[in-house]
Image: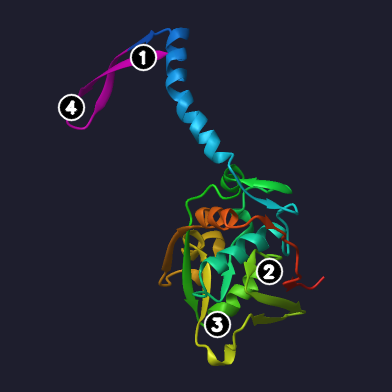
Amino acid sequence: MIVCLIFFSSCTKLISIQSFESESIEVKNDIDSLIYKMIIPYQTEIDKQMDQNLCYTKNDLLKGKPESTLGNFICDLSLETSNKQADVCVMNYGGLRSTISAGNITKRDIFKVMPFENELVILELNKLEFYQMLEYLTKRGGEPFSGMEINQKNDTILYSINNKDLLKEKYIRVLTTDYLANGGDKMSFFKNKKQNQLGIKLRDAIITYCASKDTININLDKRISLNE
């Protein structure tokens, strides 16, 4: 370890280094051992919690486009978490940072997939803003979403929202994260909207959902169809 001592001399507008001294201090093994003994009980407890089994997945939860098992899983459970406060859920492919193999799902797996402190929020989009969102999703070759079906034919985007008569609605309620709601990943159609916060982090919503299940079986369901 090197300890540096720096002395300054100052005047009205100028600060200059007047002298510089350094000293090497040996870090001894007994000190390292003492620090290790202090840390290990906390590390053991953290590992115990992180390796706790939450539920079992029959299939690999993988990333992919235009849809994926991991994206469908997270968006579906998020929409369920909203307790019918939202019509659809939209997330982003890049925000899913890992995958989960078939078998037991642990808290550690969830933290790897979602290491961020993102909060779940609901935004109200008018018809034009909603269509801009659909154009974004198709131009990106698909992004994780739930609660609707998208079918692109040439330059036309056809869509339907589950249990929703769009002719009677002025706004569509979209569930997403505060990061995306603030325009992250170039989702400009979300910016400057009032954010209805659900008071739960996306990662915590995933953990709570998994802890409430014994086994999950996530499949692709052709919720999006794009031009070849």
- N-terminal of the two: label 2 or label 1? 1
Considering only order in the chain, which callout, 1 or 4, is on the residue closer to the N terminus? 1
Q: Along the polypeptide, which appears first: circle 3 or circle 2?
A: 3
Up/down of 212 relative to 110, above or below = below
Q: Looking at numbered disc 3 in the image, what kind of residue is underneath it?
A: Leu
In the picture of the structure, the residue carrying the numbered disc 2 is 139
Amino acid type at circle 4 is: Cys
Secondary structure category for the residue under label 4: loop
Q: Residues within 10 Å of mark 4 (few under 14, many from 20)?
A: few
* Residue at mark 1: 3
Residue at 54 percent of width and 78 percent of height: 129
Q: Earlier in the sequence, mark 3 or mark 1?
A: 1
Residue for point 69% across, 71% down: 138
Q: Can residue 28 be seen in this view?
A: no
Which quadrant is the N terminus positioned in? Answer: top left
Q: How far apart are marks 4 and 2 (CA)?
A: 59 Å
